[in-house]
Image (cartoon, rainbow, N blue to C red):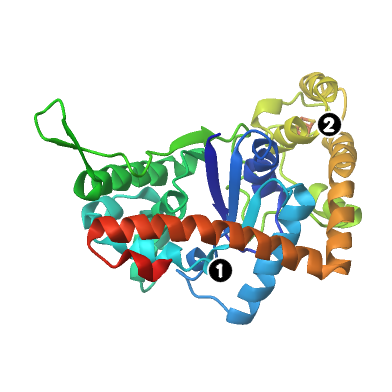
Amino acid sequence: MSRIFSGIQPSGELHIGNYLGAVKNWVQLQYEYESIFCIVDYHAITVQYDPTQLRARRRDMAVSLLASGIDPERAALFVQSAVPEHTELAWIFNTITPLGELERQTQFKEKAQRQESIAAGLLNYPVLQAADILLYRADRVPVGEDQVQHLELSRVVSRRWNALFGRPTGKRADDGSEERETYFPEPQAVLTPTRRIMGLDGQAKMSKSMNNTIGLLEKSDEIWAKLRPAVTDPKRIRKTDPGTPEVCNVYHLHRAFSPTATVEHVAVQCRSAGWGCIDCKKVLAESMERELVPVRRRAEELRAEPSRVDDALADGAARCRAIARETMCDVRERMGFDAAQSA
Ligand code: SF4
């Protein structure tokens, strides 16, 4: 069975953008692949942060993921810093990754523009990502379109390490050079089916830093307070103006939460000015409630019984640590270190 790895930052409770854009897909994938899901707290410290909040956010993220349907009996869910081999392998990969390739990463360029002082960790972020994936020799990675470039870097790192340190197979490659084993796979993208979810401002991707989110665990009145003023088709000024659903974020949220018949009805009502945007949003709020009430209920149960969250994370970390140690033993041995030290 193929193995998938995916990580999420410990940003506290999930919002519907990362629920629809990643986690809902993970819940499906855990039935199709051997699945490893990681709360990547070492990635979260590449920008300034508060240690107390980091602890609380890691916990809130674990609750959100389990409440969303990640099943610890099926998938390994764990916190990155509980498996120190991630940083050991990242260091090794740093030594074979050219600086130029990191400087070309679009996400680095975007994030660096917003920082006064740029930490080396921000530049090396994709190297740690490569280590996260390859530590488990995962061959599939569920990603959104904006992560494809980072995944390509993981493939480059994998190829380069195999060529330098893979054991000789005793055969000759097509170019006459000595063929080496493919120790690390070249992970392939499993593209997330939901296109990226825009924020309620309709301007940018839904993100806590943009303050344009709806929390996955927010109560119905809180959701409505945010949904009511959400930006719609800007050309639909009066109720009598026909709209274009494809340009409206509310329509895209209908596509994520409402049944197909409702989505078709929304499009017809919008184009014909058969209803106003508030009517449309009320129907969306009902669809969201149908999906999110059970998630909220599970989150409440988990908060009332914190040992269930602790046990799930401890079990996931133990499973992942065993795989990680095995990989690092092989890596150390092939690179001329004492393999036994990480066993
Ligand atoms: S009717 Fe619905 S889909 Fe059309 S613009 Fe208004 S909120 Fe958007």
Direction from residue 247 to residue 1 in the image, left or right: left
Picture quarter with the N terminus: top right
Q: For disc 2, does the CB lie below 8 Å from ligand 1?
A: no
Of residues 238 and 47, the one drawn nearer to the viewer in this rendering: 47
At 31% across and 61% down in the image, what residue appears?
332
Q: Nearer the viewer, residue 118 or 174?
A: 174
Please state if 180 lies on the left or on the right of 270 as rendered.
left
Q: Quadrant of residue 275?
A: top right
Q: Residue at x 61, y 55 (%)?
A: 207
- Look at the image and tell me in which quarter the C terminus lies: bottom left
Q: On the image, which quarter does residue 20 sit in? A: top right
Residue 196 horizontal/vertical position (percent):
59, 40
Residue 193 appears in view = yes
What is the spatial separation of the Cα atoms under label 1 and label 2, in whole angstroms?
Answer: 54 Å
Category of crowding for the residue at label 1, using alpha-carbon neighbours closer than 10 angstroms: few (below 14), some (14–19), many (at least 20): some
What kind of residue is marked 1? Ala
Q: Splitting the image into 4 quarters, where does residue 167 fall?
A: top left
Q: How crowded is mark 2: few (under 14 residues within 10 Å), some or many (20 or more)?
A: some
Q: Name the residue under label 2.
A: 239
Residue 14, horizontal then vertical, whole percent: 70, 56
In this view, the residue in front, 184 or 216, is 184
Vertical arrangement, residue 10 with respect to residue 287, above or below: below
Q: Can you tell which mark lies on residue 219?
A: none
Q: What residue type is labelled 2?
A: Lys
**Up-down: is 239 above or below 296?**
above
Disc 1 element: helix
- Asked if the residues shown at circle 1 and circle 2 are in contact, with their CB atoms under 8 angstroms apart, the answer is no
The structure residue drawn at horizontal position 83% and vertical position 50%, both measured from the top left corner, is 295
Question: Label 1 belongs to which residue?
Answer: 82
Report ligand 1 position as a quadrant. Answer: top right
Label 2: which secondary element: loop
